[in-house]
């Protein structure tokens, strides 16, 4: 198995084979929680105007929008996994547009298959890849706004790779916790916690706490759509 770790939007454009688009803080951690809370499908949209247009076509769909970490005005929700705790999304269709994670999906045009990645379901992703046994796996660590490295996304890619190679990273939980002062400082800064609440960080580093995988396909209209598999 040829395993590549790529980064940012430019990396997504180079992805091939089975592609894992990773956004730990917070897009794809949020989506894991949404599917665990009953969501039926999620439309990942790169452009915010397109997301609003889709919402206008389907007013009963819920719109999750984030730019610069903050909830986009006019959206139903932002990008916070703890912000949706306890909400029942059973049978709901959602729209999701973010600065990094969804940008990776729409730019991974050379991928044979796309799944999303987070620490929450990392081992489940590794087991899925093992069963598929593709010739090439591309991990796309999407970083901050898709243009700056984020240590948590690279760590997630390295962790899943370690499982695939049969040598799981023994200190993954400790390394995830150390992100507090190694890339996730904005979750602990009083001036930014209104955008990046501290509980989100701790939720997103609950390593291997969900046994589900999110796959992205195309619907009948050609739009990307994510479902739980």
Image (cartoon, rainbow, N blue to C red):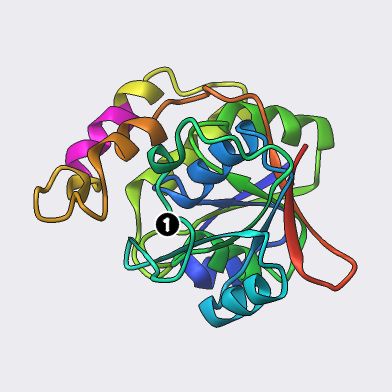
Report the residue marked by disc 1: 78
Main structural element of the magenta stretch: helix, strand or loop? helix
Please name the residue shown 74% across and 42% down the image: 91
Residue 7 in sight: no
21 up-or-down from 166: above or below? below
Q: Would residue 179 be counted in the magenta stretch? A: yes
> Which of 150/205 is in front?
205
Q: Would residue 88 be counted in the magenta stretch? A: no
Badge 1 density bin: few <14, some 14–19, many ≥20, Cα 10 Å: many
Please name the residue shown 51% across and 40% down the image: 118
Residue 200 place in picture, x, y as percent: 33, 39
The residues colored magenta run: 175-182
Q: Residue 179 sits in which quadrant?
A: top left
Please name the residue shown 34% across and 48% down the image: 151
Q: In which quarter of the image is the C terminus?
A: top right
Residue furthest front in the image: 60
> Which of 39/186 is in front?
39
Question: Quick one: SS at disc 1?
Answer: loop
Residue furthest top in the image: 170
């Amino acid at each position: 198995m040829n395993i590549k770790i790529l980064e940012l939007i430019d990396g997504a454009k180079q992805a091939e084979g089975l592609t894992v688009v990773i956004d730990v803080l917070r897009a794809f951690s949020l989506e894991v929680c949404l599917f665990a809370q009953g969501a039926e499908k999620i439309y990942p949209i790169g452009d915010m105007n397109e997301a609003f247009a889709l919402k206008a076509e389907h007013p009963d769909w819920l719109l999750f929008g984030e730019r610069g970490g903050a909830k986009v005005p006019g959206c139903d929700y932002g990008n916070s996994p703890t912000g949706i705790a306890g909400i029942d999304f059973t049978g709901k269709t959602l729209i999701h547009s973010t600065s990094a994670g969804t940008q990776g999906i729409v730019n991974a045009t050379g991928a044979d298959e796309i799944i999303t990645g987070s620490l929450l379901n990392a081992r489940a992703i590794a087991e899925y890849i093992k069963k598929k046994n593709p010739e090439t796996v591309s991990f796309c660590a999407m970083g901050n706004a898709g243009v700056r490295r984020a240590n948590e996304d690279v760590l997630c890619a390295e962790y899943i790779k370690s499982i695939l190679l049969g040598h799981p990273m023994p200190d993954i939980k400790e390394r995830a916790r150390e992100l507090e002062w190694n890339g996730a400082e904005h979750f602990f800064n009083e001036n930014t916690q209104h955008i990046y609440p501290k509980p989100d960080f701790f939720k997103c580093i609950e390593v291997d706490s969900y046994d589900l995988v999110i796959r992205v396909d195309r619907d009948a209209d050609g739009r990307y759509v994510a479902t739980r598999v």
